[in-house]
Image (cartoon, grey):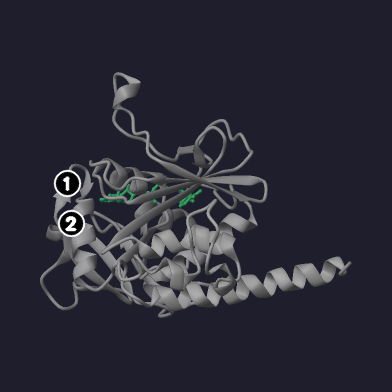
Amino acid sequence: MRPVGKHVAEAQSDDDAAWDKLLLLAKQPPGSLRGDRRRLGGQPKGHAAAGDGDFPAPSLRDLYLPLLEAGPTVAVAHLGQSLDGRIATASGASHYVTGEQDILHNHRMRALCDAVLIGAGTVRHDDPQLTVRLCSGRNPVRVVVDTDRRLDIGYQVFRDSSAATLLLTAEDKAGATATAARHGTAEVVGIPRLGQGLCPQAIRRTLAARGIARLFIEGGGITVSRFLEAGGLDFLQVTIAPLIIGSGRMGISLPQVRTLSESIRPPVRYFRFGADLMVECDLRGMGA
Ligand SMILES: NC(=O)c1ccc[n+]([C@@H]2O[C@H](COP(=O)([O-])OP(=O)(O)OC[C@H]3O[C@@H](n4cnc5c(N)ncnc54)[C@H](OP(=O)(O)O)[C@@H]3O)[C@@H](O)[C@H]2O)c1
């Protein structure tokens, strides 16, 4: 029998090799990978995988390859929540609801996508860098949604130059002059309003026109809910941690429905992240 340490080292090196392969595939346009399963070493789960030898860590392939294959553009949102559906305490503390495997997953999603988008509330509370630090891969473009341009320029995403940053704001707040078109190091882009916020579909079109085909929406709950309500998501990933906060900021929050037949019941996939469970909803074809 081989020593346990050797198994662990081999699994790690398989993960590293699989990850390098996924990063290479992420450089190709979405949609261009479809129909090429054999070359990618992938078969649907439960089938004999003709090319499995070519893809060293099938679990990474099964999780990430379908997201890379989707297209021509794809938007994936993620939330980490408690058993009672909270993504943070009432005061906004959210570090960390989910465990380290889910945090690593967030960094992997950043690395595979062209851009990572967050709402103004998350910038206010977390002041995140939105860079790729826990795995290899390049930093995505950072996109901040701030309808009325209330965030000041003191936040990290507007100060450091580790990645290009776009500030999406209502067209009437974007300003016409060259100075107004910058917010710290970020480029300001005007988007049409929809209800209380910006139009998620217009956000997707604007980003796609700038070459952002794969979009990762990392929160918070208001932002993800607005995209979901507008039919602006292809996939929604919710990682549930075995924790009850009991009060606090909600993850998904949508207008009321009268009967359960009006609720969204999408096809799902399940992934275990240590003590957490990620449920990935496939929203394609479900309409707004
Ligand atoms: N557990 C997790 O997975 C996770 C992930 C991210 C963040 N968080 C936590 O969640 C909290 C923040 O979440 P949140 O739900 O309160 O806020 P949020 O979604 O980060 O930001 C909400 C704000 O963003 C702007 N916004 C978002 N979508 C918009 C759209 N389509 N159009 C226009 N504006 C849009 C609005 O700003 P204005 O009101 O200024 O118009 C809105 O109030 C923080 O405590 C953070 O730590 C948790």
Residue positioned 29% across, 30% down in the render: 255
Looking at mark 1, is its residue's CB closer than 8 Å to ligand 1? yes
Q: Secondary structure at mark 1?
A: strand
* Residue matched to label 2: 202
Q: Tell whether label 2 touches label 1 (CB within 8 Å).
A: yes
In the displayed structure, would residue 224 be above or below residue 16? above
Using the rendered view, name the quadrant where residue 49 is placed: bottom right
**Amino acid type at mark 1:** Leu
Residue 161 tag number: none
Left or right? Give the position of 143 relative to 48.
left
The residue shown at (19%, 77%) is 179
Residue wearing tag 1: 194
Place of residue 22 in the rendered image (x, y in percent of width and height, measured from the top left): 48, 72
Q: Nearer the viewer, mark 1 or mark 2?
A: 2
- In the rendered image, residue 56, in percent from the top left (x then y), is placed at 60, 71
Please tell me whether residue 232 is drawn above or below residue 20 in the rendered image: above
Q: CA distance from mark 1 to mark 2?
A: 9 Å
The answer, for residue 36, to whether it is visible in the render is: yes
* For residue 280, above or below residue 109: above
- Residue 62 horizontal/vertical position (percent): 51, 58
Looking at the rendering, which quadrant does residue 189 occupy?
bottom left
Q: Of marks 1 and 2, which one's residue comes earlier in the chain?
A: 1
